[in-house]
Image: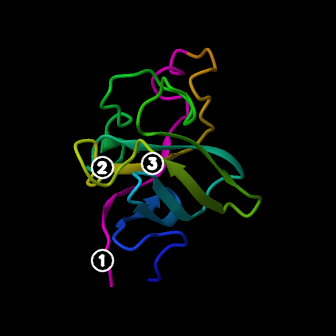
Amino acid sequence: MAMAAGAAKGSVKAVALILGDPNVRGSLQFVQDPDGATHVRGRITGLSPGLHGFHIHALGDTTNGCNSTGPHFNPLKKDHGAPTDEERHAGDLGNVVAGSDGVADVSVNDMQIPLTGPYSILGRAVVVHADSDDLGKGGHQLSKTTGNAGARVGCGIIGLQSSV
């Protein structure tokens, strides 16, 4: 696989293969630049058209499908929010958008999901949800914990990627 656009020599890379119900599939590449920003790129297919919550969850456990991936990755114990909010879980990456064909092209840049260090997301899971994430602003009882994003329709464990 070719190096992602903008990936600097010496960047740390990871990959997650997304599987879900009934036909959700995808592949995501994570590249952490030396400045600390992690770029997530890839494609997820088989989604219903529209917005879908997109998060890093605390556990890389898929023994019970996506339901065993635990809560959002939240090492600093903050409320749920938008990726641009100061008050947010580290794993809050907002929404991805699936077109009328059910395909979401993912392109996220974030400083709070490193592949190295004490808050590394390696070994954790990336999850795509059935519904849109209200970014903590929906007023629902789940807004401040999950963004009220609904069921987990696809997920994958984030693992180191070969450099060849």
Position of 117 compared to 73: left or right? left
Please give the label number shown on residue 124: 2
Q: Residue drawn at (50%, 21%), measured in percent from left and top?
A: 142
Q: What element carries label 3?
A: strand
* Coordinates of residue 58 in the picture (x, y in percent): 31, 40
Q: At 54% across and 36% down in the image, what residue appears? A: 83
Q: Compute the Cα span from label 1 to label 2.
A: 18 Å
Amino acid type of the residue tagged 3 in the rendering: Val
Percent from the top left, x then y, of residue 73? 35, 37
Q: Which image quadrant for residue 140?
A: top right
Q: Is 14 rendered above or below residue 52? A: below
Asked if residue 23 shows in the view, the reply is: no
Was residue 83 drawn as part of the magenta stretch in this picture? no
- Amino acid of disc 1: Ser
Mark 3 touches mark 2? (CB < 8 Å):
no
Residue 76, position in %: x, y?
32, 27
* x 61%, y 39%: residue: 131
For marks 3 and 2, give the CA distance: 10 Å
Tell me where residue 112 appears, x and y as whole percent.
Answer: 41, 41
Q: Where is mark 1, residue-wise?
A: 162
Span shown in magenta: 141-164
- Tag nearer the camera, 1 or 2: 1
Left or right: 85 in relation to 122:
right
Dividing the picture into quarters, in which one does residue 42 lie? Answer: bottom right
Residue furthest toward the right?
100
| Image point (26%, 49%), residue name | 61
Residue linked to disc 3? 127
Sequence-wise, the earlier of marks 1 and 3 is 3
Which numbered mark, 3 or 2, is in the foreground of this view?
A: 2
Which badge, 1 or 2, is on the more N-terminal residue? Answer: 2
Q: What element carries label 1?
A: loop
